[in-house]
Amino acid sequence: MNYKNPKLTADGVVLEKDKILLIKRKNNPFKGKWALPGGFVEYGEKVEVTVIREVYEETGLKTSIIKLFGVYSDPNRDPRGHTVTIVYLLSITGGKLKGDDDALDAKFFNVKKLPDLSFDHNVIIKDILRSNE
């Protein structure tokens, strides 16, 4: 039998007061749109390692996990196919902010003035902001 399984990703949320860290995507899907930093879990890798690695690769920032925020599994969240993302809240521990790897740019946006976002990241950010009220 040939089973289809969703792919696993991890996304990092870095909040600083009323600002959130986003990256501008270098590749399709959503090339040129903004997103939370994150990416695919490599085989044999823990998701906690993935989120720290991906955020560093895309933003130049070293981070540590504050807590697991949630899991988002809508089969339509990624046009490439069914992906499940595990979202972590992170704090910055070092590094220098710069867009790199799969990101054209990386910067902080005011949470009340967000650009158009890719995937379901608008839903994730709304959930995070609601949980902080």
Image (tube, rainbow, N blue to C red):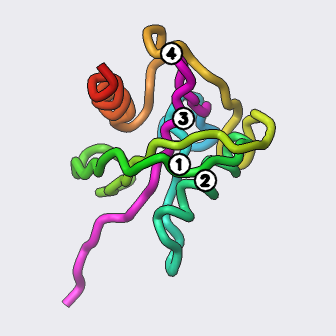
Residue assigned mark 2 = 54
Q: Residue at x 59, y 37 (%)?
A: 25
Q: Residue at x 67, y 45 (%)?
A: 58
- Badge 4 density bin: few <14, some 14–19, many ≥20, Cα 10 Å: few
On the rendered structure, is 15 left or right of 112?
right
Q: Amino acid at mark 2?
A: Glu
Is residue 73 in the magenta section?
no
Mark 4–mark 3 Cα distance, whole angstroms, equals 11 Å
In the image, which is nearer the foreground, mark 4 or mark 2? 4
Mark 4–mark 1 Cα distance, whole angstroms, equals 21 Å
- Determine the secondary structure under disc 1: strand
In magenta, the rendered stretch is 1-24
Q: Residue at x 61, y 31 (%)?
A: 24
Mark 3–mark 1 Cα distance, whole angstroms, equals 11 Å
- Residue contact between numbered discs 2 and 1, judged by CB atoms under 8 Å: yes
Mark 4–mark 2 Cα distance, whole angstroms, equals 23 Å
Instruction: Answer with the quarter of the image where residue 94 lies.
Output: top right
In the image, which is nearer the foreground, mark 2 or mark 3? 3
Front residue of this view, candidates 84 and 67 = 67
Give the quadrant of the N terminus.
bottom left
- Residue contact between numbered discs 4 and 2, judged by CB atoms under 8 Å: no
Residue assigned mark 1 = 38
Q: Which mark is residue 100?
A: none
- Badge 2 density bin: few <14, some 14–19, many ≥20, Cα 10 Å: many
Residue assigned mark 4 = 18
